[in-house]
Image (tube, grey):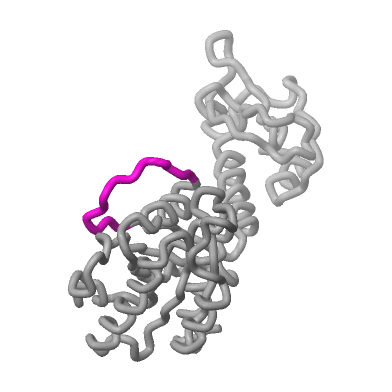
Amino acid sequence: MATDEAADVKAGSAQRPRWKPDRDTTKCEECKAEFSFFNRRHHCRRCGGLYCNKCSSEKRVLDSQLGYGHEPQRVCRQCARLADVGTSTQAQNNIVEKKEPPVLKQRKICVLGKSWVGKSAICVQFVEDRFSPYYNPTINHTYQRKIRYRNQQYLLSILDTAGQDECSMFQPQYSIGTHGYIILYSINDYHSFEMVKCIYDRIQDCNILEGVVLVLVGNKNDLPEGERQVSYDEAQQLAASWGFPFVECSAKEAESVEGVFNLVLEEILKAEGDA
């Protein structure tokens, strides 16, 4: 039998027990087998009792206050069970209340505009944080990026459309699932600015503006002022007549590109009543 001190340890005391002297018993406290040269006695490091090799073959990491550090120690079967229960209880007590993973809300943005105005460039700059000086005609490509906005995770799906060189090229299917539009022009290409008016009229003809956000964006504002063909004020007045925001950016210099997409998302949330 273990001593009273050993019983205290088994009841949860963190003090290291006094080991029972070898001379106090000639038998294993559990199986009662006689100790011998071949059946040696071992002290349980948790309760201090004497056990044979078979009955003390378990090893457990014990309470740090017992002074054994983090190395597993030889214990009797009963103390092994108690240590397992204690570890399980401690683990449960240490579990911070799990929060449900944040819901990832998806919003679709469609980028429209004439060829060469930089539709792909602003998408790549926003999603991949890089600028490519090479122009490759796009045939509708979707980019995705996760962003955190006002403590909510959003997955932005951004449809980079083929250039709208003719008004008829705006396809009604672009509107499927779309929450907001970016109509892009280049500040050094007045024809691209005229094209945004045509695109806007086409969107109106499709009756898809109800509850949908639109932002007018002028790209390439890093160019010298002498190359500008569309004034800031003229574009701002056009956007105001539509009742939608206007902003300029530079895909090449990554200037205000992040702000463009944040503005679109903010306007989408306002339209949904979430902002």
Residue at image position (56%, 49%) is 253
Q: Position of residue 265 (x, y in %)?
A: 48, 73
Residue at the far front: name it: 226
Q: Quadrant of residue 50?
A: top right
Q: Magenta includes 136?
A: yes
Q: Quadrant of the C terminus?
A: bottom right
Residue at the far top: name it: 37
Q: Position of residue 267 (x, y in %)?
A: 50, 80
Camera-side residue of 81 and 229: 229
Q: Magenta includes 271?
A: no
Q: Quadrant of the N terminus?
A: top right
- In the figure, 219 relative to 106: above or below? above
Residue at image position (52%, 61%) is 228
Camera-side residue of 134 and 64: 134
Residue at image position (20%, 77%) is 172
Report if residue 71 is visible in the image: yes
Please state the total of marks drawn on the protein image: 0
Region in magenta: 130-142
- In the figure, 90 relative to 18: above or below? below
Q: Quadrant of residue 104?
A: bottom left
**243 sits to left or right of 108:** right
